[in-house]
Each structure stands twice: as C-alpha cells, then as structure tokens.
Amino acid sequence: MGNKKTAIYIRLSDEDNNVDGIVKAESNSVAAQRILIRDYMQRNNLPAPTDALEYVDDGFSGTNFQRPAFRRMMDDAKSGKIGCIIVKDFSRFGRDHLETGNYLERIFPLLGIRFISVNDQFDSEDCMGMTGGMSVALKNIINSMYSRDLSKKVTSAMGTRAARGEYMGAFAPYGYLKNPENVHQLIPDKEAAEVVRMIFTMAAEGKKKPEIARFLNEQGIPTCMEHFQKIGLKRKSHKEKEKKLWTITTIGDMLKNEVYLGKTIWNKTRQAAVGSKRQVKNDRSEWTIMEGTHKPLVSQELFDMANAKAFTHEKKNVPAGRKPQPILICPYCGRRLTLTSWGNAYRCGQAAFSGIAECRTIHVDRERLENAVLSCTRTMAGMVAAEVSRKKKEWAETAAIEEETGKLEAEKKRLSSRKLRLYEDYRSGRITKEQYRKEYENTASRILEIEKRIPELKEEIMKVREQMLHMKEREAELEGLESLETFDKGRLVTVIDSVQVYSEERIEIVWKMDDWFFPEIAREKEVVTLE
C-alpha cells in the first residue's frame, strides 16, 4: 500500500437502540468495535493500529451514506491517503445492499482499496470469482431487511410507551425540563414557564404575534435557543441565526402547542422512509394524545382564547411547497427583506418587532436594487463561463490518460504471458538458468511498476470525471444568466448566497463559489453602490 494508511470505520446508530428505547453506551459499542478491529490488525500482520486513521459516525443510520465521518473517509480515499478500509461487519458499513455492492465492486477496486469485514471473514484481496460477490449481496440484503424490521419494532415500542403517557421526545419543549429522576416525564422550567404564560396572556388580550415578538425582543428576553444554552442544554438548530430573535413563527408554534395543556402527543409526524431525515405530517386522527401526563402551564380557557385571537387572519388552503431561499438580507438581524405595501421598495421584514434600531433604517428602491444585482450577476456569470471553458480544454487530456492506462494494461497482460513462457523455455533448454532468472526478475519488476501506475492513473481519471460532472451541472445552472433580464430569485440563487443590504450606498453580494473549481475568480464579497 506504499505510504497509504489503513482506515478503521466505526458506526453506531439510533437503529442500535433496543425496543425499550435504552441506548447502548458509546463506551460499550464504539469501543467494542475499535478493540475487535485493532485486535484483527495485530493478528493478521497489518500496519500497527496506532498508525491507522479512525472514522466514527455516532448516531447515523446505515440505510444511507450521507454520514459525516464516512464522507470524510471517502474524500481521503479519493485523494490517495487510504489503501485499506476495515469494518466490524457489513452492517456497520451500510445496510443498503445495492449501494454497498457498488462500493465493493466498483468504487474500491477503481481506487485500489482493499476492504475487510472482520466478522464476515471477508477480505477483497482474497475474494475471487462470483461466490464472494454473491455472499456479500446476500448478507447486505439481510441487513437491509433487518434495518426495516428493527425500525418498525422500535416505532411500535415507542408508541406503546407514549400511549402510557411517557414523553418520548428527544428534547423537552420550551417551558419544560425533563425530570432528572425520570427522563420520560416533563416538569415545569420556572423561568421559561413564566414567559410561556406571558405569551398566552398577551395573545388572549388581543396582542398580535408581531406585537408579542417585538415586546420580547425589546425587553431582551432570551429566545428559546438562548435559554437552552444558558441553562447548559446542548441544543442547536441548523437554521440558527447569529442574531437571536423572537419571531412570528416561534410565537405561533408555541400558541398552537398542546403540550402546555398538560398533554403528551405522539405520532404527529413520521419518517418518510427508513434512514431518511425527512418527516411527513400525519393526520390528527393518527396522533396518540394522552391528557394529564404533566403539569399544564396554561388553562384550556386561556389556550382557546389566545388561539382564537392570534389566528384570526390565518391563510387558508395555501399550496404546499418549499419556499424559495431568500437572497436579499438585512445585515443587522440576518432576516430577509420584504417589499413595502406599494411594492416599490425593500425593507427589513422584521423591523416592526426585532427591537433593533438599524432594521428600521433600511428602505431601498426596488428597481435600482434589482438592476444592480442583475448587472453584477451577468458579469460574474460571464467570468464563470470563461473559466468553465478553460477547464474543459484542460480536462480534455483525460483521453490521453485513458489511452496510457489501456497500453499499460495490455503490456501487463503480455508480460504475464511472458512469465509463463520463460519457464517453459528454461525447461526445454532454449534459455539458460541465468537468462531465465534475469529475464524473470526484469519482467516481474516491470509488472510491479505497471500495477502501481495503473491505480494512480485510474484515480486521476475518476477525479477528472467527477470534476467534469460537476462542471456540467454548473454549466446547466449558469445557462442564461449572462443575459438574464428579470429578477428571478430561483435562477439568481445558483450563484448568489446572499445580498446584504445596508443602504443604497452599501450593498454586499456574497457569491457561491467552489474554491477548488474556480480559485482564480472566487471572491467572498462584492461591494456595490446603487447608481
């Protein structure tokens, strides 16, 4: 393997919970995999375990391969750092039999990577013919079926516990804490509970959601996330903004949450598919609702009155669909800009209740702002298109590399046949023993050189193909941007991360650039002044 390292891959998943919901300790599961693999390496004269690279995915399903440590390992593999990957068994590597087979039969051989599954007694270096491949496929089909069956059992068991009134959520909702003596029971969080009651009371008095949010922000009351972090809970949202604010959405979600009535509700959503992170809403008729499971923070009367007054103008029958990513952003609160009622200018959509004075100062002419962004986008798209064209010419050399690989493979085949004939020539007396030894050593040495060079060339070809694929995707995204005349956010978002609008004198465009793909023209920000 030369200077390449051995990679130890370990995975512990939520799938590994037993049906009672008791999580296996990290020290028992991850440590056990680590010990088993390192012991195997020592017994089989593999490189010292201390020199191995270790990749651990803790809490990730095996039914998909979008795991952080796994992706890091594959990036290292593609860059030539790894020559061998060892796992405890196939199920630790992945439970999707088709994708696992793709890695074992195509990707790893192309990268020249040896794959070992200890408990399955599988070593790709020893696997010959179809039998090994059939065995791998069969085991992975069983793993895939097991994952689905286990998921159903865990869901069923958790539903049974929820029906007994036990709280099964991963985190307690704002206003509550998990009882230290029983994690499946909620107890009031004194400080947050007072804020919850205040929100319901204000709504019942006729205060609208924007008014409530503005009051909380102006009073400097910690947001839900700030409160969790303040009391030492490790909570983080993927949508979390740098500037924390109470928002209309947060207030609305709280007012609708029946947990504050002392109810435990289970099965409001379901997993779209085994291993998927996407959740699908269930109809209320499918919910499991248990009343009186914990102390309520508000009465039913206050809850009903707050909801009746807070949602009088709620939009009905709004078609489902993902909202487009906002582009025009207020730099002071990090939220999107919205059009004024006349539609001729942009302003901060949170100015009315953010409590931040600078938010109220943003008022930028719509036409001038959109034209400035379009002009900069057309210029950037032209630069990117020119760079793509240059890269295409550069990567066209792939054909030459493939031709060289083909010649080397043909030469290796001829030399292998030559090795067999050499012995026959020696036995028949056509060459001397010294001639046989010299030619055999030269032939074997050349074959080793070829065997080392071919994986390097194939890896180079694969990298270029990946880059070409990425480039084609980028070309499709950029098509038409050089002549774009309308402020189409769906198109602009392909090259723009955000437009930070301070005033008509200062606008910052943050571009989406791939550093590895466009290093010559990548710019983090472009500052623009409206003309």
Image (tube, rainbow, N blue to C red):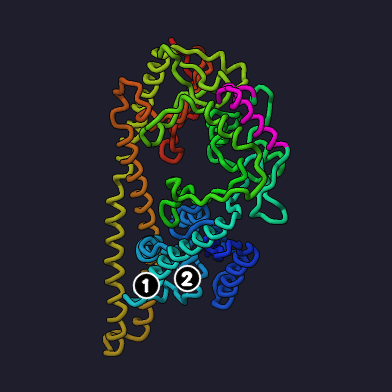
Per the model, the C-alpha gap separating discs 1 and 2 is 17 Å
Residue 470, given in percent of the width and then of the height, sits at: 35, 43
Give residue 431's mark. Answer: none
Q: Is residue 450 visible?
A: no
For residue 336, side relative to residue 219 (left or right) = left
Task: Give the residue pinned by disc 2.
Answer: 116
Task: Give the residue furthest to the top.
Answer: 531
Amino acid on which disc 2 is placed: Ile
Q: In which quarter of the image is residue 483?
A: top left
Residue 17, relative to residue 196: is it above or below?
below
Residue closer to the observer: 368 or 476? 368
Residue 488, given in percent of the width and then of the height, sits at: 34, 25
Give residue 138's mark. Answer: 1
What residue is drawn where x is 60% and y is 32%?
242
Residue closer to the observer: 397 or 488? 488
Q: Which of marks 1 and 2 is in front?
A: 1
What residue is drawn where x is 27% and y is 51%?
399
| Magenta highlight on residue 119 | no
Task: Give the residue furthest to the front.
Answer: 301
For residue 503, side relative to residue 294 (left or right) = left
| Magenta highlight on residue 200 | yes
Q: Earlier in the sequence, mark 1 or mark 2?
A: 2
Residue 300, given in percent of the width and then of the height, sits at: 60, 37
- The residue carrying pointer 2 sits among few (fewer than 14), some (14 to 19) or many (20 or more) residues within 10 Å by Cα, namely many
Amino acid on which disc 1 is placed: Leu
Q: State whether the magenta stretch is mostly helix, strand or loop.
A: helix
Image quadrant containing the C terminus = top left
Question: Magenta residues, as a range?
Answer: 191-215
Residue 295, given in percent of the width and then of the height, sits at: 67, 45
Q: Can residue 324 be seen in this view?
A: yes
Task: Give the residue furthest to the bottom.
Answer: 428
